[in-house]
Image (spheres, helix red, strand yellow):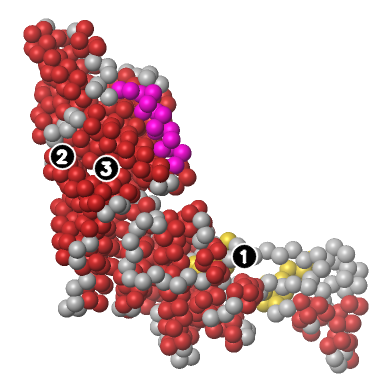
Amino acid sequence: MTQLLEAVSTPAGELGRAGSLDALAALWRRRNSGRRLLVLLDDVLDAEQIAPLLPTTPGSVVLLTSRRRISGLVGARQHTVRPLTDAAASALLTQITGRDFTADRDQLARFTRHCGGLPLAIAVAAAYLRSRPTWRLNDIVERLTMAVASAVDDSLTSPIRAAFAMSYRALAPAHRTLLRRLAAHPGDDIGLQAAAVLAAMPVGQADLALDVLVEHHLIEETARHRYRLHDLLRAYALIQIQLELDTGASDDAVGRVLEFYLACAAHAESILRPYRRTLGEPTAISAWGAATLGSPAKAQAWMDEESANLMAAAAYAHERGWSRHTSRLPFVLAQHLDRRGHWSQAVQMLRKALDAARAQQGETRNDTVSGQLMTDLAAAHVRTGDLDEALDAAEQALDAWSGCGDERGQGDALIELGRVHWHARRPTVAAQAFGRAVAIFGRIEDRRGQAVAGYHKGIVLFELGESEAALVQTREALKMARQLNDPVLQCDVLANLGEMYRLIEDHDKALHYFRQAQKLADRQGNPHNIAILASNIGAVHDHTGDHESALASFRTALRLFQAVGDRRNEVDVLVHLARAHTRLGDYESSLVSIERATELAEQIRDPLRHARVCLETGRIRQAQARYPAAVHLYRASLGYARQAAAPLDQAHAHQALGDALLALNEPSAAREHWNQALDLYRQLGYRDADPITAQ
C-alpha cells in the first residue's frame, strides 16, 4: 500500500500520519478520487489481500497475476495463461540467447518438450545457455534432464524449484499429499475415479481436492474430470516424495491404482469379449466400475480413454517386478490393442505377459496359462505377418493345451495353426487344421468355436475351388453367429461371405452381405474390419462401373491398412486402386500404385500377392498396347497362382493370357488358355464366364 501511495506522489507527511492499514487505505482512496488508474498487482494471494488497493474511479483498470484462481472479485475477467506453444517457446529461446537453432530441429523439439511451454523454465534455461557460448542446445537439454531428477539445487533448476516450492508450501498437508500421489501415477493423465483410488479418498472428497490443485494451477483439467501434471512439476513432486520419506505410502498408492486399472480393464474386456478366457481368477470390480462399464459401448470408451494409462501401468509393473500385474495387465491390454489394430504393441504386451508368467511359475509348469498366451501370441504374429513366429507359437499352444487335456484350448490353437498355414499359402494343411477344430468344438458343443473354425474352413475351401461347399459352410457359420447374438462374429462371417460372392461375381449378394457387415463394423470401431469392408465394397463399385466411388473406398481402406500395418491387405487394395485408375485411363496413377504393391509383395514373399500384382501390371501394359510385356507378366502371374494353390487367380491369369495372345494374332494359343480359364471358372461356380464361352 505504501509503495502504491508513493507511486502517486503522496507527501511523506501524509504517509507518516497514516498509522494503520485502514488509514493507508483511506488515504489511497482520497489521493486517487477522480483519477483513472492502471494498476498492476503481481502474485496476488486472494481477494481479501487486494480489496483495499482497488481504485474506485470509473474507467480504472487493474491487472493482477496469481498462482491460483481468484474468486470474490465482482466484475473480474479471469484468464488462465496457457503454456507457450512450441513456436513461441523457440522464439523466446532465440530472443534470449541471440542464437539461431532452426538447423537443430531434433534438439529444439527435445528442449521445448522438456520445458513444456513454461516461460520460467524456458527463460532460465535460455539465460544459462547464453552465458555458456561453447554449449550446444543438446548440452542444455542433457543438463536439464539430469538436474530435474536430482534433489540437489543448482543455478539452472533452483529458480524453477523455488517457484514450485512457493506454490507447494501454500497447500494444506492433504493437498500436498495428493500432489505427490498424482506425481507417482505411471500415466501422463488421470481420471477422477483413479485419482480417488490413488489418494485413498472418497470420490466426492477427491473431486474437491483436485479442484484445489486446479485453482492453484498445479494441475490442469484437460477435460471434465481428467487431470494432467506438468512434467517439471511432476519431477519436483517426485523429489518431495524422497525428501519427505513418503516412498512406502507412494508405492502403496500406485499398487492400489494398478489393481483398479486391472479390475476395470478385465471387466471391460469381459463385456466386450465374454467368450474369451482369462488368466487366473476374476478381479473384483467396484460398484463404480460395474456401473460405468456396464455396456459394450461404455466398456470400449473406457478402454480407449485409459489405453495409454494401462500401457504405462503395465510398463511400471514390469520394471518393478510386481508379479500380480506383470502378466495379467499386458494380457488384457493386448486384447484391446489387437482390436484397435496396434498389432506390434499387442505382440510386445503378450511377450511381457509370457515372460512374467514363466518367471512366476518357476519350475512349476502351468499349461493353461502358457496355452492361452501362446494362442494369443500366434494370432498377433499372424496379423503382423511374422508367420514363422506365429507357427512356433501356435504349435507350442497346441502342445500346452494337449498337455492339460483342454479340448477348447486345442480347438483355439488349431484355428491359429490353420490361419498360419492359410497365410503361408498351404491351403490343404490349413483346411485340415480348421476341420480338426470344427470336429473338436462340435464334440464339446462349443457353438461359437464351431462357427469360427467353420467360416475359416469355408474360406480355404473356396480358395481350393470348392465354392459350393465353402458357401454352405460359411452360411452355417453365419446362422450360428446369429443364434449366439454375437455381433463381432457376425461381422467377420458376413464380410467373408460377401467376399466369396464378390469373387464369383454375384455382386448383388456380395453388396447385401457387405452392407450388413459394415453396420456392425462401424458400431464396433475395429479399424481393420472397417478397412476390409471399404476395400471389398470399393471392388464392387469398380466392377459395376462406379470408379470414383471405388477410388474413395480404396483410399479409405489403404489409409487404415497402412495405419495398422497390414501389408497383405495393403497389397490387395493397391492392386484394386491400380485397376480403377487403369479403367479411367490414368496409367500414371496405376503404375504408382502397382510399384508400391510390387515392393510390398517382395517384402512379404507371398506368392498369391505376387500373382495379383503381376496380373494387374499386365493389364496396365495391355491397356497401353504393350502386348508382349503383358504376356510375360500374365505368365508370371499364372506361375505364382499355381505356387499359391489359388485356382481363381489361375483362371484370371489364363483369361488374361488368352486376351493378350489374341491381340498378338495367336488365336490357337489364346483359345487354349480360355478353355483352361473356363474349366476353372465353372468348377468355382463363377457366374460371368459367358464372355469366354463366346470367344
Tag 2: Cα neighbours inside 10 Å, few (<14), some, or many (≥20)?
A: many
Q: Which residues are magenta?
A: 505-521
Residue nearer the viewer, 535 or 45: 535
| Quadrant holding the N terminus | bottom right
Q: Position of residue 385 (x, y in %)?
A: 22, 48
Residue drawn at x 39%, y 28% as measured from the top left: 511
Numbered circle sitting on residue 427: 2
Q: Is 627 drawn above or below residue 32 in the view shown?
A: above
Q: Is 162 drawn above or below residue 401 in the view shown?
A: below
Report whether 261 appears left or right of 394.
Answer: right
Which badge, 1 or 2, comes first in the chain's sequence? 1
Q: Secondary structure at mark 2?
A: helix
Q: Is 656 drawn above or below residue 364 in the view shown?
A: above
Distance of mark 1 from mark 2, alpha carbons?
63 Å
Numbered circle sitting on residue 454: 3
Give the label, 1 or 3, closer to the camera.
3
Mark 3: amino acid = Gly
Q: Which residue is mark 1?
A: 81
